[in-house]
Image (spheres, grey):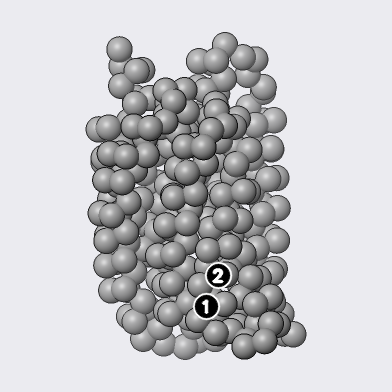
């Protein structure tokens, strides 16, 4: 297996820059949550260090796995590869742009009504508030950079590449059913990685809580994973950014945590 170090370093640089922009928002969010819960707030440097270590570790692991295994499975990041090899950037981005824009918009239009009109209404109040508050802690820039970029590097470039490669070892190789299974498993994997964060935010364990988390991460995996498979990592990032961009104004209007804070 060939490990393309320049691509790994480029992805790590992009991920670290996005994390650097998101960390201040994440720290403030944790401080607000602990203050509301009347719990001791650790020194800010400890919070920053903890967030940085956790996320950089996930980034390094995902980037290493993806850079090693993605080329073996036909998965790629065409624009980033073009940047490194001097290839044509526009011809690498153009096929991904429209699918990413359309998929991001359509996925949000389907997800949001189901999320607000069904799933949240069947949650206990504490978990509803915690979910809303956790999202509200990130401003739009944080959602675009952390959710849109970092999560795609971890979930698609790392986890999905791993699961597709493992599936390729089975009889039949990288058939469509194997890839779809890998797509779903990447969604489950990302949900499990963040599960402790949801508990820390105040979510209570219940069947509906797990249904909400499963719906969110599996739906995103289906849409963004399909884009990664068919077009490239950048298409998945574009779609996830559009998804967050469309969700943000609704969240500001409908967010239970903000409504309670304003009372």
Which residue, given by chain and number where applicable, does mark 1 sit on?
Answer: 177
Give residue 97's mark: none
The crowding category of the residue bearing disc 2, from other C-alpha atoms within 10 Å (few below 14, some 14 to 19, many at least 20), is: some
x then y, percent, for residue 25? 48, 36
- With 57 as the anchor, is 93 left or right in this view? left
x then y, percent, for residue 119? 37, 39
**Is 136 drawn above or below residue 215 in the view shown?**
above
Q: Tell me where residue 66 sits by quadrant.
A: bottom right
Identify which residue, 170 or 154, lies in the foreground. Answer: 170
Q: Is residue 10 visible in this depiction of the protein?
A: no
Residue positioned 36% across, 63% down in the render: 239
The crowding category of the residue bearing disc 1, from other C-alpha atoms within 10 Å (few below 14, some 14 to 19, many at least 20), is: few
Tell me the quarter of the image containing the C terminus. top left
Most distant residue in the front direction: 207
- With 167 as the anchor, is 81 left or right in this view? left
Residue positioned 50% across, 15% down in the render: 36
Q: Tell me where residue 258 sits by quadrant.
A: top left
Most distant residue in the right direction: 1
**Is 34 drawn above or below residue 211 in the view shown?**
above
Q: Tell me where residue 160 sits by quadrant.
A: bottom right
Instruction: Kindly indicate whether the residue at mark 1 contacts the one at mark 2 (C-beta within 8 angstroms).
Output: yes
Q: Secondary structure at mark 2?
A: helix
**Is 60 drawn above or below residue 49 in the view shown?**
below
Q: Secondary structure at mark 1?
A: helix
Which residue, given by chain and number where applicable, does mark 2 sit on?
Answer: 181
- With 190 as the anchor, is 4 left or right in this view? right
x then y, percent, for residue 78? 48, 81
Tell me the quarter of the image containing the N terminus. bottom right
x then y, percent, for residue 23? 55, 40
Identify which residue, 184 or 107, lies in the foreground. Answer: 184
């Amino acid at each position: 297996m060939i490990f393309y170090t320049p691509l790994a370093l480029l992805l790590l640089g992009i991920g670290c820059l996005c994390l650097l922009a998101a960390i201040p928002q994440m720290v403030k969010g944790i401080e607000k949550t602990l203050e509301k819960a009347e719990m001791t707030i650790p020194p800010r440097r400890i919070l920053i260090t903890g967030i940085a270590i956790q996320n950089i570790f996930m980034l390094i692991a995902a980037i290493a796995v993806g850079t090693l295994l993605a080329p073996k499975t036909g998965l790629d990041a065409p624009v980033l590869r073009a940047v490194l090899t001097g290839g044509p950037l526009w011809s690498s981005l153009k096929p991904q742009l429209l699918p990413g824009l359309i998929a991001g918009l359509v996925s949000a239009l389907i997800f949001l009504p189901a999320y607000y009109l069904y799933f949240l209404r069947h949650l206990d109040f504490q978990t509803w508030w915690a979910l809303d508050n956790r999202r509200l802690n990130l401003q739009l820039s944080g959602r675009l950079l952390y959710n849109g970029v970092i999560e795609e590097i971890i979930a698609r470039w790392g986890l999905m590449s791993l699961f597709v490669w493992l599936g390729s070892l089975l009889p039949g190789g990288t058939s469509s059913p194997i890839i779809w299974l890998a797509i779903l498993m990447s969604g489950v994997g990302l949900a499990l990685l963040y599960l402790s964060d949801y508990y820390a935010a105040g979510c209570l364990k219940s069947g509906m809580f797990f249904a909400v988390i499963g719906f969110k991460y599996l739906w995103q995996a289906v849409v963004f994973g399909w884009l990664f498979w068919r077009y490239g990592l950048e298409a998945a990032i574009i779609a996830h950014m559009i998804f967050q961009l469309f969700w943000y104004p609704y969240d500001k209007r409908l967010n239970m945590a903000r409504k309670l804070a304003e009372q």
